[in-house]
Structures are given as C-alpha cells and as structure tokens.
C-alpha cells in the first residue's frame, strides 16, 4: 500500500454524529489520503445479524477484525473500513467496507438504512449482498433498497424526460455478488443440476401481467437486472453448529464445515480475480486519496438534504484532487531537484536532473489529477515547474558568476598589483603585460572551464582592461609606431574573439532552454495521452460490459414472452451503440485539443526565460567591473 501503511485492524469510515447525521471520520480519511495507488473497493451490505463481517474478515485474510456478534443486536454501526495490500493486483490496495446491518428494529430509521445502502453502492467497485436461507420473494422484497436507487442517486445533474438512464447506472454501478448464507437446498431445477449463478437468474425471472401485485413482484428483479451488468451468486452452507456459531472468531479452520471453507475460498478467489479498481464517470480510476474525498462529497450532499449526483461529485472531486495534485507534484519536483542539484554545475547536467524530476512530478500529477479535461491544472503545474526551474537556472548562473569572480580575482591578482605598482610602464613593459595577461587567461580558463559563465566574465574583464592595455602600449618606447598600431589591432581582435566566445556561451544556454521546453512539452503530452488512452480503454470496456448485459437481457425477455420490453431494450441498445460510436469518432479530435493546449501553454513560458537569465548575469557582471 503506497504511503498508506498496512492496517492491522479496521477503523470506522462513516458514522452518525450527535445529531444523527452521517459524517466521515478523520482517522479513516487520513488513512485513505496516504494511499496514492488505485483502490479495489468491496462493500458488503445486508440485513443485520447475517454474518456480513465474517466474510469480509476472510477477504482480509484474517480470522477476526471486523466485529462479529453472537446476539440479536447489530454489531457494526455505520461503515467500517479495512485497507490491505491487494493479494493479486500489484500496486493496488484492497479496501473492504463493512456496513451497518439493514433493518435493525431497535434503530427504526429506514432512511438511514437507505443512505448506508446508497453509499455502499456509490463507493464500491464490487457490492456483496449477504442474506440467509434462500433467494425467494421474501428475500427480494427485503432488498427493496435497490428499487429506491434512482430516487436517491443521480448519475447526471440534468436528465431529459425520455432519456434512458439504465446504461448510465450500469456504467458506474459496481458488480453485484449475492452471498446466500446457511443454504440448505440442492441446486436443482427439476432433475437438472444448476449453478449458483443460474439459481440467482432464475430467482430474478419476471412475471407476465400488468397488475399492481405483478409490478411489485417484478420491481426489485427488474432493478437488479437493469442496474447491475455483472451479477454473481455464491451459496454457503452453515459454517458450524449452533453452539460454535456463537464464537466464530475463536474457531480454527478445522472447526468449520469443510464445504463452507471450500466455498469461502472460491468466493475470495473470485473477488480477488474479478473485482475491478474503482472508477467514476469517464473511466477514471481513483486512488485512496480520491476515495476519501469522494466519500466526503457524497456524505456532505446527504447531510445537506440533497440527492448525491455522480456528475457533480466528479466536478467537486476534480477541484479537490487537482489542487492537491499540483501541490504534491511540485513538491516532488522540488525535492528531487534540491536533493540532486549541486550548484554551480554544467547546464546540461542540471537539465538532465530537471528532466528526471519533471518526469516524476508529472507522474505524480497524472496519478492524482482528476477530470482535468481542459488541462487547466496541468498547465498550471507546467508553469510552476518552469518558474522553479528558471529560478534554479538563475541560481546556477549566480553561483557560477560568484565562483568565476572569485577565481578571476585570485588568478589576476598579480596582474592587478603589477598595474597598480606601475610595473609595466617601461620599455618592454607591454610585451611583459601581454604575456602575463595571456598566461593568466589560460590559467583562469583551466580553473573555470566547467563553469557556464566563465567566458562571459572573462570577456567583460578583458574589455575593462582594453584602455589600460592601450596606455601601457603607448608608454612602451621600445616599440616603433607600426608595432604599436599592430598591437592595438591585435588587442581589439582578441577582445572581439573573447566577446564572441561569451556570445556563443549564451547561445548554448538559450539552445538548452529551448530543448528543455520542448522536452517539457513532449513529456506532458505523452503522459496525458497515456492517461487518456487508459481512461478511454476503461470506458470502452464499461460500454461493452453494459452492451453485453443489455443484449443478454433482451434475449431473456424474448424467451420469457416480454415482447414489448424486448423492443424497448433494443431501442436502448441502439442508443448505446450510437453513443459508443460517437465516443470512438471523437477520440482523435480530443487528443488533438490536448496537444494544442499543452503546446500553447509551453510557448507562453519560454519568451521570458532567456531575457531574465541574461539580465541577472549582466547585473552581476556590472558589479564586478
């Protein structure tokens, strides 16, 4: 579990405050904030005292953890959370949510139960419904919460009256697993053996007719069939005798029924292998941090008396996540730069460190960012990284200038003293001055050859000595006029050549800056395209999963004689196919828009880089001479 640490025991995620309103517990939120990797969220719901907590402990690989009770009182209150490293998916965390038992007579708050059920649906990628006995009409009537989902959850902020919402719900709702406990019947239909999945689908078969009684009978079945594209069923025999059932936490595996143990292992394997990472609208996979923020967004909507809306939640979550993504990505960049950069240093080496740091920072941003469709926050990050890198380059210039200044003073100290003492104002003094200047120049270059400002500093120094050199030349009576004229020209040529070296040095810096900016552009574009491809692939898979479910449902309706409903389902299938085709054809233009947006952002940063760096260099040089 990335940065989140391993939890030794569950903690409460959501409970009621003193006014009876739900709220997210800070301890659990802090734990989720530390999980930077994708999460697979498995929730269990069901009537109280049906053994929900035990199967969640099995999923956690533990005998105990989530509280078990041995009385008729509901043991779990609110929603409890246990985060463990995923046993099969590397780089993922398995988040187990154990919910308060529904239908507790002492609680007497039906709306509270409805919200607990809705939150389990909204937060999970796989929903386990736990019940006792058999899947009969009574069991389905007790699952009436599923019939209220459309009243208590909205996928879109605004929906037209004739718009089919079932596909939207199917895309974002979790897979559904019905765990039937203490099952004593044979899995047979007539004389034929059937699977537990066939048993579930048989129980969800609709009745023909249009009476109120038939509608009541069909409603929970139709909701399960229309909202959950993936449905699975497991039947568990009684795990132990009545006496041992009262002390389940204390029992060893050899005290449990062998058939129960085998089915429990099969159940866990299925969850480990098939439960998908949690995603929201648009195929966006969320991390533990995002899950904690999402829980707060949903709970706040419930507290304020609103219906939780997935579309609005994604917008709210995007704002929260993207601000933090920029902050943490920038922090990652600065940590990397400050730990690796030892100023002054070669600009190319600093650029390579910047490349590594920026790549890591971009990865941090991409992992945390959410719904940044217009790349507003990514462009903000690019700007901030650019500014920090620019400041680092300026610091490198300043450090190089200071070091070159110090070396220049040390090296040319003897020359300066000779000038002050009038050592060169004599016959033959110019040649002595010229040779000394050449010797010290070579020594200076040898000591500063790795410094970016060495030639610029030397150029300014030699320019400042031009007048002194001419004065010494004029005072040297050993040179005839022609020789003096020749030396004057040679001195001017040397100064021009040195100035050219300084300009070439600055040109290399400018070229490096443009390379850095191009590399920044390429890195951000590559990262975001990879992210978009992952999201589009997940959307494609979700659409195909929904399409397959609707095609199966249409065939089932036809087989069972529901011609009108089958025709309506075909209309939904056609609408879904049209949406899928529209998404497919819009992908290239979306990619192009992203590339253009990032490219525009990159060009905005570069113009100020070189002038600012050059201005800093010149202001320092003016202090030297």
Image (cartoon, rainbow, N blue to C red):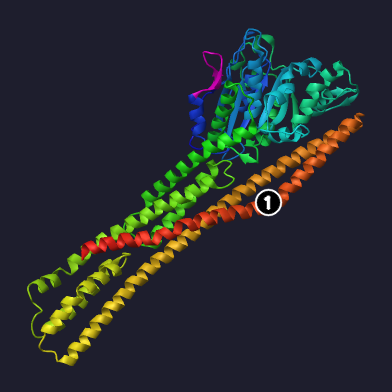
At 71% from the left edge and 47% from the top edge, which residue is drawn? Answer: 583
**Between 339 and 207, the one nearer to me in the picture:** 207
**Where does residue 229 sit, x and y in percent of width and height?**
75, 33
579 and 351: which is toward the camera: 579
The image shows residue 326, relative to residue 516, as above or below, that is: above
Q: Is residue 342 visible in the rendered structure shown here?
A: yes
Query: Residue 369, relative to residue 471: is it above or below?
Result: above
Quadrant position of the C terminus in the picture: bottom left
Q: Position of residue 355 (x, y in %)?
A: 46, 56
Task: Determine crowd level at label 1: few under 14, some 14-19, many 20+ residues with C-alpha closer than 10 A.
Answer: some
Please tell me in which quadrant of the rendered image residue 121 appears: top right
Give the extent of the magenta segment.
13-25
| Residue 530 in the image, given as x and y percentages of width and height | 60, 50
Q: 549 and 466: which one is in front? A: 466
306 relative position to 8: left or right: right
Q: Is residue 277 left or right of residue 574?
A: left
Count of marks placed on residues? 1
* Identity of the residue drawn at 88% across and 22% down: 207
The relative height of residue 207 versus residue 539 in the rendered view (above or below) is above
In the image, is residue 43 part of the stretch drawn in magenta? no
Element marked by disc 1: helix
Residue 60 appears in the picture as rendered: no
Task: Report the residue marked by disc 1.
Answer: 587
Task: State whether residue 570 is above or below residue 221.
Answer: below
> Taking 532 as reference, is 213 left or right?
right
Q: Residue at x 78, y 33 (%)?
A: 162
Rendering coords of residue 515 (x, y %): 46, 63
Camera-side residue of 563 and 94:
563
């Amino acid at each position: 579990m990335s940065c989140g640490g391993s939890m030794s025991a569950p903690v409460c995620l959501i409970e009621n405050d003193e006014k009876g309103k739900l709220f997210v517990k800070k301890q659990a939120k802090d734990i989720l904030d530390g999980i930077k990797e994708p999460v697979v969220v498995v929730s269990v719901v069901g009537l109280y005292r049906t053994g929900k907590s035990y199967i969640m402990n099995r999923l956690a690989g533990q005998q105990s953890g989530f509280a078990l009770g041995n009385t008729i009182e509901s043991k779990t209150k609110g929603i409890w959370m246990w985060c463990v490293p995923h046993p099969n998916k590397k780089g993922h965390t398995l988040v187990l949510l154990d919910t308060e038992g529904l239908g507790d007579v002492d609680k007497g708050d039906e709306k509270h139960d409805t919200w607990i059920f809705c939150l389990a649906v909204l937060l999970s990628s796989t929903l386990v419904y736990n019940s006792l006995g058999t899947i009969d009409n009574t069991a389905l009537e007790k699952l009436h919460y599923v019939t209220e989902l459309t009243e208590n959850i909205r996928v879109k902020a605004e929906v037209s009256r004739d718009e089919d919402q079932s596909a939207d719900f199917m895309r974002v709702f979790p897979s559904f697993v019905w765990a039937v406990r203490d099952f004593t019947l044979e899995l047979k239909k007539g004389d034929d053996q059937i699977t537990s999945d066939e048993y579930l689908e048989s129980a969800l078969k609709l009745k023909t007719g249009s009476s109120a009684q038939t509608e009541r009978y069909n409603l929970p079945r139709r909701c399960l069939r229309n909202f959950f594209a993936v449905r699975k069923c497991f039947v568990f025999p009684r795990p132990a005798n009545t006496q041992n059932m009262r002390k389940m936490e204390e029992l060893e595996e050899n005290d449990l029924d062998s058939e129960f143990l085998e089915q429990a292992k099969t159940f866990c394997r299925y969850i480990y292998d098939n439960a998908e990472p949690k995603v929201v609208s648009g195929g966006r996979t969320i991390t533990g941090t995002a899950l904690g923020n999402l829980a707060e967004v949903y709970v706040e909507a419930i507290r304020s008396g609103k219906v939780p809306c997935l579309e609005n939640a994604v917008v709210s979550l995007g704002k929260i996540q993207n601000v933090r993504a920029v902050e943490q990505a920038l922090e990652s960049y600065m940590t990397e730069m400050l730990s690796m950069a030892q100023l002054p240093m070669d600009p190319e080496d600093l650029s390579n460190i910047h490349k590594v740091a920026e790549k890591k920072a971009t990865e941090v941003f991409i992992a945390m960012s959410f719904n940044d469709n217009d790349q507003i926050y990514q462009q903000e990050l690019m700007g901030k990284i650019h500014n920090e890198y620019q400041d680092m380059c300026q610091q490198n210039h300043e450090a190089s200038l200071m070091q070159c200044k110090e070396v220049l003073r040390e090296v040319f100290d003897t020359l300066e003293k000779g000038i002050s003492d009038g050592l060169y104002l004599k016959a033959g003094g110019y040649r002595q001055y010229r040779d000394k200047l050449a010797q010290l120049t070579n020594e200076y270059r040898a000591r500063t050859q790795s410094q970016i400002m060495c030639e610029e500093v030397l150029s300014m120094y030699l320019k400042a000595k031009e007048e002194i050199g001419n004065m010494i030349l004029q005072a040297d009576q050993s040179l005839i006029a022609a020789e003096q004229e020749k030396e004057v020209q040679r001195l001017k040529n040397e100064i021009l050549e040195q100035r050219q070296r300084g300009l070439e040095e600055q040109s290399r810096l400018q070229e490096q800056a443009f390379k850095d900016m191009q590399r920044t552009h390429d890195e951000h574009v590559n990262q975001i395209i990879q992210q978009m491809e992952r999201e589009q692939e997940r959307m494609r898979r979700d659409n195909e999963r929904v399409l397959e479910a609707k095609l199966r449902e249409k065939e089932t309706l036809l087989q069972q004689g529901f011609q009108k409903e089958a025709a309506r389902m075909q209309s939904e299938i056609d609408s879904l196919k049209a949406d899928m085709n529209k998404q497919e054809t819009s992908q290239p233009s979306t990619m192009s828009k992203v590339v253009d947006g990032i490219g525009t952002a990159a060009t905005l940063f570069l113009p100020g880089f070189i002038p600012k760096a050059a201005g800093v260099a010149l202001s320092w040089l003016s202090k030297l001479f």
